[in-house]
Image (tube, rainbow, N blue to C red):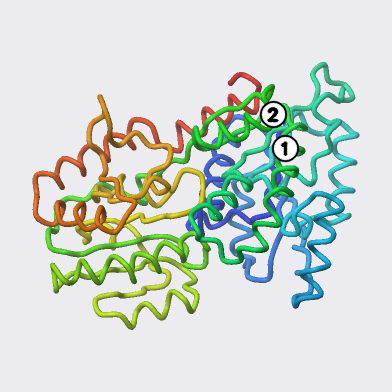
């Protein structure tokens, strides 16, 4: 099968973030059995070495320069909102569109060059024309397969931020909410296959398009990068992992560092908190001034930091979709204390389910859960073992790749 994968994010190296790691690993699996062309965009920070490395994984790497960001300031924002109101496409999606890319894609489809087109993240939907899902191709008996891999519902995320009062710009998001509803409802109609990562997102997308063929395909973990730890370090060392320029992560670490961690230190004065992840913004860097908190920036091995930690906290208050950080911590054997958002899509507790993580959504719940893990080595051992077992059973990239291939082929 000839497959074209669209990814406005240059998905290499996969360690850069959630979109990178998911796109790269799904691409790697598809390329084992199919002829894969990757159409992507290059920003100034992408090196020639990274281009060369990524090109080895695909049949053809088609690169376009990423469009220049629109002008900022109040006039620019008002102009972009006006365009959103009129054309129904969010500014961050519209900003990725380029006539040269669209022209190349239109010609490729018209010539019947591909059997399937996948959008790796919903922002790439802008390049896919509605008529393609039923279009007969030259010299081909079946219509073109069009697939969108929705990493998280943009409407659901915005709605959740407003409900939990974690929105950075309340008035903007309140105005955007009905527009995002209209936008997501519209673009979900034009694909022959929709992929989501969690049941929550499936429910949201199914409401937008009751007739849609939706497959739930969660993320996975590379056990080479996240091996199971050889020993329990004990102690009172907390860790949070994730890209530190991501809004949901910024909100999570600021909430935990300011509201929860000082209370932990009252009970355990020697407790530490490592905030580990690339590109920390000033709001994260300033947290290092608080007693016991270290902001590392990017590190050579996330697993090394995990292995020497007692507990991994995932105090997400917003952001839909399955969390790589939770999967990676569980794979590494580190007990997790996470919120409903941090544990989304994972069977970690409840009737008939082995205890694989501790759940906390409020300050007192975090304090109780962390204290239990600090003081009960047998509980740490149980959760470590059960968490790793879950990842091995259900959350490998090999499993995700096979299910994604089935979705692209129409066999899901």
Q: Position of residue 277 (x, y in %)?
A: 42, 66
Q: Quadrant of residue 31?
A: top right
Q: Quadrant of residue 170?
A: bottom right
Name the quadrant of the C terminus.
top right
* Residue under pointer 2: 209
Vertical placement of residue 254 versus 108, above or below:
below
* Residue under pointer 1: 185
Q: Position of residue 220 (x, y in %)?
A: 43, 40
Left or right of 148: which side holds 68? right
Element assignment for label 1: helix
Q: Earlier in the sequence, mark 1 or mark 2?
A: 1
Q: State yes or no: discs 1 and 2 in contact (Cβ < 8 Å).
A: yes
Seen from the viewer's position, the closer of residues 233 and 289 is: 289
Seen from the viewer's position, the closer of residues 356 and 412 is: 356
Element assignment for label 2: loop
Left or right of 5: which side holds 167? left
């Amino acid at each position: 099968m000839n497959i074209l994968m669209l990814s406005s994010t240059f998905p290499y190296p996969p360690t850069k973030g959630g979109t990178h790691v998911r796109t790269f690993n799904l691409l790697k699996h598809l390329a084992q059995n199919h002829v894969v062309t990757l159409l992507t965009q290059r920003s100034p920070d992408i090196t020639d070495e990274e281009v060369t490395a990524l090109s080895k994984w695909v049949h053809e790497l088609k690169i376009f320069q990423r469009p220049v960001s629109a002008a900022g300031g109040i006039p620019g924002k008002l102009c972009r909102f006006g365009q959103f109101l009129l054309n129904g496409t969010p500014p961050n999606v519209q900003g990725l569109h380029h006539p040269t890319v669209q022209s190349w894609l239109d010609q490729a489809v018209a010539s019947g060059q591909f059997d399937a087109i996948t959008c790796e993240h919903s922002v790439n939907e802008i390049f896919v024309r509605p008529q393609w899902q039923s279009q007969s191709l030259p010299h081909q008996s079946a219509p073109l397969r069009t697939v969108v891999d929705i990493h998280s519902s943009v409407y659901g995320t915005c709605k959740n931020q407003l409900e939990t009062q974690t929105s950075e710009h309340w008035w903007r998001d309140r105005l955007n909410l009905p527009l995002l509803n209209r936008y997501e409802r519209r673009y979900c109609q034009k694909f022959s296959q929709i992929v989501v990562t969690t049941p929550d997102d499936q429910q949201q997308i199914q409401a937008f398009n009751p007739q849609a063929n939706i497959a739930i395909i969660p993320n996975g973990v590379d056990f080479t990068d996240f091996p199971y730890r050889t020993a329990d370090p004990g102690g009172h060392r907390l860790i949070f992992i994730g890209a530190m320029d991501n809004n949901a992560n910024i909100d999570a670490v600021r909430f935990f560092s300011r509201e929860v961690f000082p209370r932990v230190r009252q009970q355990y004065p020697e407790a530490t908190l490592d905030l580990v992840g690339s590109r920390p913004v000033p709001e994260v860097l300033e947290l290092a001034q608080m007693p016991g908190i270290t902001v590392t920036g990017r590190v050579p091995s996330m697993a090394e930091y995990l292995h020497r930690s007692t507990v991994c906290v995932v105090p997400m208050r917003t952001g839909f979709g399955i969390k790589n950080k939770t999967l990676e911590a569980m794979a590494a054997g580190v007990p997790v204390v996470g919120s409903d958002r941090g544990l989304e899509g994972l069977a970690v507790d409840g009737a008939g389910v082995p205890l694989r993580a501790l759940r906390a959504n409020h300050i007192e719940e975090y304090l109780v859960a962390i204290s239990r893990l600090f003081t009960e080595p047998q509980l740490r051992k149980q959760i470590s073992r059960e968490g790793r077992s879950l990842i091995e059973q259900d959350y490998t990239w090999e499993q995700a790749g096979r299910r994604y291939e089935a979705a692209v082929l129409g066999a899901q």
